[in-house]
Image (cartoon, rainbow, N blue to C red):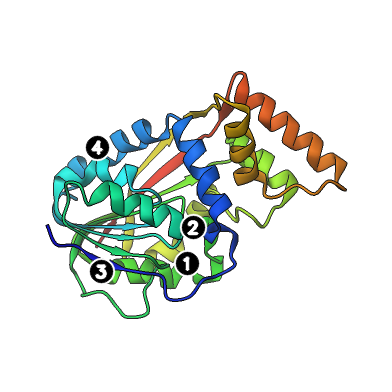
Amino acid sequence: MRNNIVPLKQPEKRFFLQRDYALGYLALSIGSQEEEVLGAAFRQAIRSFGGAGRSLLDIGCADGRLTARVAQFFKRLTVFEPNPTLFNHAMARLSRRHQFDGRNSTFPPDHRLLPETYDTAIASHVLYHIERSDWPSFFQAIAQSLRPGGVCITVLWNNLSDAKKYASRTDPTRWLCTSEDLLADRDSLASAGFEIVDLRQFDPVIRAYTTEAARDVTAFLLGPTRPEAPEALALAAEVEQTLLSGGLNNSQTAITVRKR
């Protein structure tokens, strides 16, 4: 099976491109119910709103585990993932059974995708890394890529998420938004020609089964903790203990929109 894989042109320093981010994400995925919960939600949305068809656009596919959960509905996959470590995991996972076009880059790409090519787009936990002023152009690029009637599923933490609340106590700029922020800024969706057709809340729990995993997930959520910041160290210890005991609520909302 022949696949097209486009590497990242230049290394960047943004935190979500770093190897530590990838290690934290992988540890979180192993100890979370997110893959199962979101995979089921994506499949239901695709069935309910007519998103199944020839091609899928997955923006920020991470290690490809969620992409693989819905790949059966499509003949062709195009995936974007800027983190090199996660991109390599995704390519290894998807190349086993699927025909795909892999881009180790952010979205939108330097050159435009063919217009009206995709039946479904997924942007799961991506908007955190995009300035709010760029949301209209981001959704316009997605809309241009979708066929009329195509759907886009966006997932974000919501205000009930303990993971988000902890993260906001150390660095409010690390994760920029919640699903409530997107719903309050519906102009970004409307200006791109989208209408909201479904809202769905999920409450997966993040757990860690080793101290090392708890540390990786905590660093992923909170960012690096400096020894000279005792309050941040105490918060990190609290998060680690929560992950190792009852688990951390990771409440999130899936927002499905349809291109008019």
> Does any portion of residue 257 appear in the rendered image?
no
**Which of pointers 3 and 4 lies earlier in the amino acid sequence?**
4
Q: Nearer the viewer, mark 1 or mark 2?
A: 2
- What residue is drawn where x is 59% and y is 67%? 13
- What residue is drawn where x is 42% and y is 76%? 9
**Which of pointers 2 and 3 lies earlier in the amino acid sequence?**
2
The quadrant in which the N terminus is found is: bottom left
Query: Which residue position holds label 4?
Result: 44
Residue extending furthest top? 246
Q: Are marks 1 and 2 in contact (CB under 8 Å)?
A: yes
Query: Which residue position holds label 3?
Result: 145
- Against 238, is 184 above or below? below
Query: Which residue position holds label 2?
Result: 127
Q: For the residue labelled by badge 2, is the local secondary structure a helix, a strand or a loop?
A: helix
- What residue is drawn where x is 54% and y is 56%? 128
Q: Is residue 2 left or right of residue 107?
A: left
Q: For the residue labelled by badge 4, is the local secondary structure a helix, a strand or a loop?
A: helix
Query: Which residue position holds label 1?
Result: 135
Circle 3 crowding by C-alpha within 10 Å: few under 14, some 14–19, many from 20: many
Q: For the residue labelled by badge 1, is the local secondary structure a helix, a strand or a loop?
A: helix
Specify the quadrant of the image occupied by residue 159: top right
Separation of disc 3 and disc 1 at Cα?
Answer: 16 Å
The quadrant in which the C terminus is found is: bottom left
The foreground one among 105 and 40 is 105
- x and y percent of residue 60 in the render? 40, 56
